[in-house]
Each structure stands twice: as structure tokens, then as C-alpha cells.
Amino acid sequence: MTFIEREQSLTSDEVAITELQRVFALQKKAFVEQPQPDLNQRLELLGALAHMMISNRLKIQQALVADFGSHPSQFADLVECLGVAGRVQYVASNLGEWMKPQQRPIEPALYGTAKAYVLAQPKGVVGNMAPWNFPFDIGIGPVVEMLAAGNRAIIKPSDLTPACSELTLEMIKSTFDLDQVAAISGGLQLAKFFPTLNWDHLMYTGSTEVGRSVAVSAAQNLVPVTLELGGKCPALVAADGLNSRNIEQIVGCKTIKSGQMCVTVDYALVPENQQENFVRLVQQHMDATFTHGASEADTTGIINARHLARLQGYLDDAQAKGATLIPIGDATDKAARKMPLTLVLNVTDDMALMQNEIFGPILPVKTYRDIDQAIATINAGERPLGVYVFTDTPAIAQRVLARTVSGGACVNSAALHAAMPSLPFGGIGKSGSGRHHGVEGFNEFSNQRAIFERGENDNIRAMFAPYGELANGLIEGALTGES
């Protein structure tokens, strides 16, 4: 069989896997040859990444529309493009300080004039398995901290967003050397193979179920992983927090990407005597801002027909089990893959939409008698990526924050903690592990290397046998508090 015939006989995923192995080996070799890029080299790479995002702004907008059917250009700019560039700006302005040795105290009676410090060392070659909902913000965004930490990176875009994946490959190839940053696309076979490589660190963003299998595969090589998963992020509305200002935050967050966002409001908790008022305020807000409902150009299409059917299945299941559905706006448009924001009342925990992360424009509304019951409802579920509390009483907000556990939290807003380049982003428990963004992201993709440099006038010999008066004196001094 000739080389050409062999290539033609391979599936696209087999070709992608072969290319991944080749690029992975190239990057491993390059890292060994240059394991510690200096500040200027890292800043140059970060500058190239920011320029790449800005110069491809219009292409990014077009690719998102191609994959989602409809996607607002302004949101593409704000998050998928400028959000990544802004992340570069923040990291670049702080990188010099983050790279400095962190001095740690020593005991002079034992160690004399020695030095102890922590130095952030690049880990090596880092993989990023990106999701379909934010192809650039999460596909390329974490590469900011990966490069800042001195690593090399390989991105695997989602196969559910082929236009965005193709653009990612095009942008990366024209901006970076293959042995520095690369992107390789493929389907299920590639996705299963990707975490089996001996990465120096691996990041995955997506569902908890797939995240578990990624972690198992990575564990075979003891590869450290950053898992950004999902969960049911609640919006707890206190009695004094039910107003138009807060409704704008809840509904605004829920309509971003038509709810296809891991940190979106998954369900609302409202006082049982305020449910009608909550529904009224939501309807007023939607009537004032989305006059044509789901058909608005500023709404994002559901990623594919399968996910649209999944969401409709949640609604059908809820209605069959006694829920009341309140669609706000036009009816579902299957051809355009658009569906209206739908409030779901009288929900019960056995409904599919309360058993799963919704990831769509559906907002279940649960009621509670008092704040303690609302907190108990949150704590009865898995720990989410975010908890959002709406109240004008600081003591209530602090009570909720103190008695719940989540990856992040917001007071009188929703999901904005995930947009801050200075705040670490990540989950806890089944919503994920590890952090990216900011200095925590830099540390996540760095090896925190502990370094000890011996000085003068020490008594280190007391640590070695045979033990005698010197060791006894140091012990006595430690026990009596004398140096």
C-alpha cells in the first residue's frame, strides 16, 4: 500500500490522532530544549494571542453564526473576542510580579542565613479540551495563563462547532509555531484518545459525565487535571430582593447564549408568597426588552437539533408531571433552532429538568418559606459552579454565602464572577476542580517549586547522626521557646 493509499484508508479521526501524536512529541522536545522562557518571551506570545483575537474579530462573529444559526455579534465581541484580549492585558500587566520568587520564612537558629522560596516553574505541554458553547473564550482563553506560566499548549476544539473549530485551527496555525501552540480537531475517537497522552497538565470543560471519564483516562498517567464542569446554579431571591433591577440580572443571564452557559441561572428560588410577582416581573422585563421573543436577532440558536429535542423533552416531562409552563415570546422554531424563555412552575425534584443541568432557555421556579429552607434546598443538591443571591440586606447575603459551598458566587448579579480576569474560575465537587483566570490560573498551570539555598552560620549538622549536645540544645530551645 502506498503512502497516499494508506492516508486515504484512514478515517479523519485516525489522521487527527496521528497528527496529535506528532505535534505532542514536537512540543515535548521543544520544552526540554527551552524549559524556562523568560518574561519577554512570554509577553511576546501573549501579545501575539491578543492580536490574533482582535484581527479575527469579524471571522469569529461569522463562525459563531455558522455554528449556532444565530449569535449576536456584540456578545461575540464582548466575551469571545475582547474577553480573551482583556484577559491577556490583565495577565501581562501582572506577570512580572507573579514570576518573582516568593520568599518564605526560615528558622535562623537552625538554618542561619539560608534562603527558602517558591518559584513558579512551567509544567511543560498542556492540553485543553474545549466545549462547544464558548469555542473561543474557553478554547483559547485558558491558553493565556498556560503561556503566561511558560508552557506549550495543544487545543482540541469541539466537533459540535465545526466552523469555530476550523477558524481556531486557522488562527493558531497562522500565529504560533507548531511546537508552541497548536490546535487539532476531530470527533469522538480523538476526544477519547486526547486525555490518554502523558500531558504535563490537562484541562477539560464540559459535562460532569464526560469529565469523569477524562479524569479516569488522565489518571492512568497520573496527569493533573483541571475540570470545569457544570451544575445547577441557583438564583436565590430574598423577599427584599424581588425587584426589576434584580430580575434584569436573572433574565439577562439566562438569555445569554439562550441559557447554553455553565454558569447561567439554572433555577430560581423565590418566596412562596412572591411567585406571582416574580412571574409578572419576568414577563414585564421580556416584553420591554425582547419584543419578538426567541426570534430576536440578539438571541442565540440552540447548538443542534438533538439539543433542541432534549430541551423540549424536559418541558414535556415537567408538564406530564404536573408543572405549569409559561413560555414568554414566540413559539419554538425548529428550523432556526430557537425556543422562547419558558418559566416552569410547580416543579418537583423528580422532573428531568431538576435532575439535569438544563443548558437552555428554561427557568424552573421553586418556592420556599424562609431563607433556611432555601439554603437547605441548595445544599441538598451537588455543589454548583455558582450561587447567586439577590437581597438588599447584607446579613442575608452573608448568611447564604457562609452556609453554601460553590465554585463562585455573586450578590445581586449572576455569572459575572466568571467574567472577571482577576478572579479564579472553577468548580468544586461534581462542578469541577482546579482554577483558571488570574494569578490562580497562572499557579494552576505552574509547578510551585520549593527551593532551599544553604547560607552560613547554620546548625544543619544537628539533623544528622550521631546526635548529641547540638541537637539536644536545639530541641530544648524549641520546647522552651528560646532561640
Image: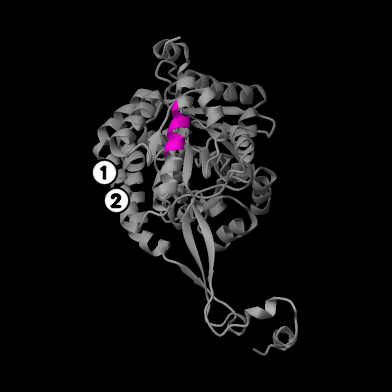
* Left or right: residue 430 compared with residue 292: right
Say which residue appears at 57% left-offset and 24% top-offset: 315
Q: Position of residue 150 (x, y in %)?
A: 41, 51
Q: How many marks?
A: 2
Q: Is residue 178 positioned above or below 337 on the image?
A: below
Picture quadrant where residue 198 is located: top right
Asked if 38 appears above or below 179 in the picture, the reply is: below
Q: Which mark is residue 44?
A: 2
Majority SS type along the magenta span: helix
Looking at the image, is 223 positioned above or below residue 325?
below
Which segment is the magenta one? 19-26
Front in this rendered view, residue 46 or 471: 471
Answer with left or right where residue 438 lies relative to residue 471.
Answer: left
The residue at the point 63 percent across, 79 percent down is 460
Residue 165's spot in the image, x, y percent?
A: 39, 28
- Please state the horizontal and vertical placement of residue 373, each as a whole percent of the image: 68, 49
Q: Which residue is mark 1?
A: 51
